[in-house]
């Protein structure tokens, strides 16, 4: 589908000369996100992460399951990308969320949002320490010295888990009261909060977990320069990085609205609008959306036809979570049970660029899919996933009504 550039409008954007309907948007989604598209067996991990840019990793299993759905990688292959080749980095970034990303994307995401995230996290932690009746320290100085001590320990004594770090670095054992006087507040160790600040600041990164398989979140920690040089991570100023991040998002997700982009990046709409102007972004009309979509200059929005493109995507997959306005590919109303009350997506069944239900894994390893089947190919995809998982059992960090219902079916 060729799209002419159009003429610049008075507000700096090119005029909308193209209308993109929902069917075409779904074809673009299948093609650009490799959602059940042909060629899965020929793709590499690097091909997939280059196409998606950022993969949710709050649930440790999500990037593994998402990569399996899109390429013929084994868990060992993905482990190698994270921990041996280190071409993939887990990093706390946009929306204070842990993402897995290729190294060329890390400076873009980090530069766009992380300085503000770190300021917020550090100020919050300092406030907790100051307010706690169980502590009597200069919170700012204490935190700075503790952060430096943690990084120095990881460099001198090697990567380790947070529990080991708390033994190496005694200040991490400090306990504080996060909400003094509140009935729900309980004293807690400072360890996890300091590690969260250091991770967002780009000083340390999550290494191989101490658990038995890729579903474990018992992270070890290492200096981030085992993956990427800190100076490279900090190379872009906030404005330039945000513009690059918007461009990177549109390469995968266009057409997308201002609402979509602001929600995904967590940046103010005025900043997004400025980035779109700098990118010479072009407006397009979208079906059943009350605002225009945007595409990068030169994006022809080409998408081949799809037929029987079937995929099982994990909870929090970047495709399911890629847009704020999702009506064109999923019914995300609370009554469908595909999302939890906080808007986190559960595991989803996709056919031709549309979500048709949810799935889960039963204790015996069976992949449970919607009972009506929808297509014969779905059974084959489910069997392939069960074989790939082997003895691994996935427990969703954010279970939804659909997964709970499927789990109940198993127990009955």
Image: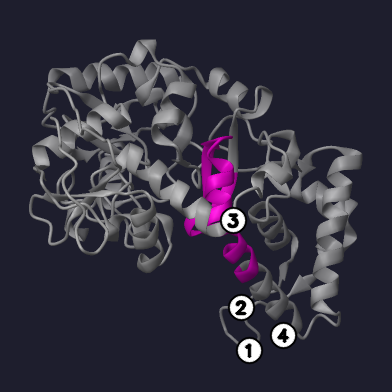
Q: Are marks 1 and 2 in contact (CB under 8 Å)?
A: yes
Question: As drawn, is 342 to the left or to the right of 349?
Answer: right
Say which residue appears at 8% left-offset and 42% top-offset. Answer: 21
In the drawing, what numbered circle is on residue 237?
A: 3
In the drawing, what numbered circle is on residue 185?
A: 2
Whichever of callouts 4 and 3 sits on the residue coming sooner in the sequence is 4
Badge 4 local density, few (<14 within 10 Å), some, or many (20+)?
some
How far is disc 3 from disc 2 in space, using C-alphas? 38 Å
Q: Is residue 317 above or below residue 111?
A: above
Mark in front: 1 vs 4: 4
SS under mark 4: helix
Q: Are marks 1 and 3 in contact (CB under 8 Å)?
A: no
Q: Quadrant of residue 207?
A: top right
Q: Nearer the viewer, residue 273 or 329?
A: 273
Whichever of callouts 3 and 2 sits on the residue coming sooner in the sequence is 2
Q: Are marks 1 and 4 in contact (CB under 8 Å)?
A: no
Mark in front: 1 vs 3: 3
SS under mark 3: loop
Task: Kindly identify which residue carries mark 4.
Answer: 131
How far is disc 4 from disc 2 in space, using C-alphas? 13 Å
Q: Nearer the viewer, residue 61 or 119?
A: 119
Question: As drawn, is 76 to the left or to the right of 170?
Answer: left
Task: Kindly identify which residue carries mark 1.
Answer: 181
Q: Nearer the viewer, residue 17 or 395?
A: 17
How far is disc 1 from disc 3 in space, using C-alphas? 41 Å
The x and y percentages for residue 281 are 29, 49
The segment highlighted magenta reads 91-120
How far is disc 1 from disc 4 in space, using C-alphas? 11 Å
Magenta region's main secondary structure? Answer: helix
The x and y percentages for residue 358 are 25, 40
The x and y percentages for residue 263 are 35, 59
Q: Quadrant of residue 324?
A: bottom left
């Amino acid at each position: 589908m060729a799209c002419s550039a159009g003429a610049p409008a008075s507000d700096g954007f090119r005029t909308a000369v193209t209308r993109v309907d929902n069917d075409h948007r779904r074809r673009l989604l299948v093609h650009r996100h490799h959602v059940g598209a042909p060629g899965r067996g020929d793709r590499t991990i690097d091909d997939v992460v280059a196409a998606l840019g950022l993969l949710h990793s709050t649930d440790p299993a999500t990037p593994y399951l998402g990569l399996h759905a899109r390429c013929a990688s084994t868990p060992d292959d993905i482990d190698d990308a994270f921990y041996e080749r280190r071409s993939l980095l887990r990093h706390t970034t946009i929306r204070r969320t842990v993402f897995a990303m290729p190294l060329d994307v890390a400076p873009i995401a980090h530069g766009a949002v992380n300085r503000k995230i770190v300021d917020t996290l550090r100020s919050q932690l300092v406030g907790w320490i100051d307010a706690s009746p169980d502590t009597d320290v200069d919170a700012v100085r204490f935190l700075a010295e503790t952060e430096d001590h943690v990084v120095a320990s990881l460099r001198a004594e090697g990567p380790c888990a947070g529990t080991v770090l708390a033994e190496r670095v005694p200040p991490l054992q400090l306990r504080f009261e996060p909400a003094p006087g509140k009935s729900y507040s309980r004293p807690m160790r400072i360890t996890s909060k300091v590690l969260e600040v250091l991770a967002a600041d780009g000083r340390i990164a999550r290494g191989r977990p101490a658990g038995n398989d890729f579903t474990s979140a018992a992270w070890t920690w290492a200096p981030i320069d085992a993956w990427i040089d800190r100076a490279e991570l900090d190379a872009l100023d906030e404005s330039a990085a945000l513009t690059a991040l918007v461009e990177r998002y549109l390469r995968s997700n266009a057409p997308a609205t201002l609402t979509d982009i602001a929600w995904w990046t967590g940046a103010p709409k005025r900043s997004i609008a400025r980035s779109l102007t700098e990118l010479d972004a072009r407006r397009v009309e979208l079906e059943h959306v009350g605002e225009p979509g945007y595409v990068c200059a030169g994006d022809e929005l080409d998408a081949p036809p799809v037929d029987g493109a079937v995929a099982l995507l994990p909870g929090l997959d970047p495709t399911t979570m890629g847009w704020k306005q999702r009506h064109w590919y999923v019914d995300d109303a609370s009554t469908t049970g595909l999302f939890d009350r906080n808007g986190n997506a559960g595991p989803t069944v996709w056919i031709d660029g549309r979500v048709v239900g949810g799935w889960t894994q039963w204790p015996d390893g069976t992949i449970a899919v919607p009972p009506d089947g929808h297509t014969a190919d779905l059974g084959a995809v489910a069997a392939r996933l069960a074989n790939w998982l082997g003895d691994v059992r996935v427990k969703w960090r954010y279970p939804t009504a659909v997964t709970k219902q499927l789990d109940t079916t198993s127990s009955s």
